[in-house]
Amino acid sequence: MPRRKADALPFRPFAEDAGVQTFAGFSIENGTRRIALHGSLDLTRDREGLRRAKALKTLLDAVVAVLESEDLPDAVPDEPETAEPVRNPFA
């Protein structure tokens, strides 16, 4: 089955702080120190469930590949990543 454009990863894991992969109510937010998973994803026993499972597996395989290729610390600090201040366009 050909790969749908929506299945392509819009970001490289840990490469930047702005990318989000979303499908079926489930979001994966990219970050340089952590990747956040939000929402829910039903993996139904049908072709759509298989497509979703493969998309999730592809994304997680990419995350694992990046982690395995680096010399990792024991843990990342729990504090949230600091964001760059942005001028309020409504002020």
Image (cartoon, rainbow, N blue to C red):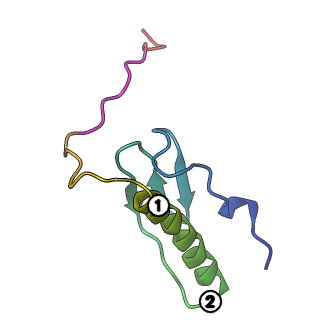
Label 2 to label 1: alpha-carbon separation: 26 Å
At 30% from the left and 30% from the top, the residue drawn is 82
Residue 91 vs 38, above or below: the answer is above
Q: Earlier in the sequence, mark 2 or mark 1?
A: 2
Residue 43 falls left or right of residue 68? right
The structure residue drawn at horizontal position 42% and vertical position 44%, both measured from the top left corner, is: 31
Q: Mark 1: few, some, or many residues within 10 Å (few <14, many ≥20)?
A: some
Q: Magenta stretch: residue 29 in it?
A: no
Label 2 belongs to which residue? Answer: 46
Badge 2 crowding class, 10 Å Cα cut-off, few under 14, some 14 to 19, many 20 or more, is few
**Residue 3 position within the rendered picture, expressed as x and y whole percent measured from the top left:** 75, 69
The amino acid type of the residue labelled 2 equals Asp
Q: Quadrant of residue 21?
A: bottom right
Name the quarter where the C terminus is drawn.
Answer: top left
Regarding mark 2 in the picture, which secondary structure is present there?
loop
Closer to us: 70 or 85: 70
Image height check: is 18 above or below 35? above
Which label was assigned to residue 73? none
Q: Residue at x 48, y 67 (%)?
A: 60
- Residue farthest to the top, as pictured: 91
Q: Position of residue 38 (x, y in %)?
A: 39, 58
Is label 1 in a helix, a strand or a loop?
helix
Write down the region rendered in magenta. 80-86
Across and down, in percent, residue 77 comes to 19, 44
Judge from the rendering whether residue 39 lies leftward or rightward of residue 11; answer left or right: left
Q: Which residue is mark 1?
A: 63
Total marks drawn?
2
In which quadrant is the N terminus drawn?
bottom right
